[in-house]
Amino acid sequence: MNKEPRFPGAVLVTLLLAIVLTIIPLSEEIAAWRPEWIALTLIHWGLVIKDRVSLVVAFAVGLIIDTLYGSILGQHALGFVLVTYLAVRLGLRMNPEAFLQQMTLLTAVLFLYLLISLWIQGFTGNSVSGGLFYWASLLSSVVIWPVYHTLLGYFHVQRKVI
């Protein structure tokens, strides 16, 4: 069965919610464990409605985050485009209900996203504080994924194929 958004703006509403969750100020200790909300949202929609997830939207959201964080313009945009592309392409080859496959895909894609972000920061001379805590968001994202994926499931309905 194919799934489609419950209403036309479901993808944008969930991305706006993810942006809000991403920019909420937290203390440094807690912020290190903040899940990658936007990447999780892009992965969810990439797995659910593969044919309608736009790389342009992922790029635009990345530029918004780059602007809000004051990071290098294009850093998050490149990461989000890569996350969306990989979620859609690899999602075509897997069963969307296979939990272990989802977790493997999620871990690999988020690891690559964080690695590219780390590489860009290092290449441009920006030091990354926190050491191993840089990877804490990967762990928290993987832990929160089943709940978040289920909650985002309320934004789409299954279409019955007759």
Image: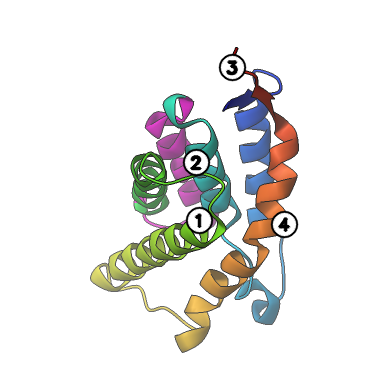
Instruction: Name the element at disc 1.
Output: helix
Q: Quadrant of the C terminus?
A: top right
Q: Say which residue label 4 marks.
A: 147
Which badge, 4 or 3, is on the more N-terminal residue?
4
Marks 1,2: beta carbons within 8 A:
yes
Magenta-drawn segment: 52-74
Q: Residues within 10 Å of mark 2 (few under 14, many from 20)?
A: many
Q: Distance between the Cα atoms at labels 3 and 1?
A: 24 Å
Amino acid at dot 2: Leu
Q: Distance between the Cα atoms at labels 1 and 2?
A: 9 Å
Q: Say which residue label 2 marks.
A: 47
Marker disc for residue 102: 1
Q: Quadrant of the N terminus?
A: top right
Which badge, 1 or 4, is on the more N-terminal residue?
1
Amino acid at dot 4: Val
Q: Position of residue 93 (x, y in %)?
A: 35, 43
Amino acid at dot 3: Val
Going by the image, does 23 lie left or right of 43? Answer: right
Q: Position of residue 73 (x, y in %)?
A: 37, 49
Mark 4 vs mark 3: give the one in front. Answer: 3
Q: Residue at x 53, y 83 (%)?
A: 133
Q: Say which residue label 3 marks.
A: 161
Q: Looking at the picture, does residue 28 appear above or below residue 41?
A: below
Q: Distance between the Cα atoms at labels 4 and 3?
A: 27 Å
Q: Residue at x 43, y 58 (%)?
A: 105
In the image, residue 128 lies in the stretch drawn in magenta: no
Q: Residues within 10 Å of mark 4 (few under 14, many from 20)?
A: few
Q: Residues within 10 Å of mark 3 (few under 14, many from 20)?
A: few
Instruction: Name the element at disc 4.
Output: helix
Q: Distance between the Cα atoms at labels 1 and 4?
A: 13 Å
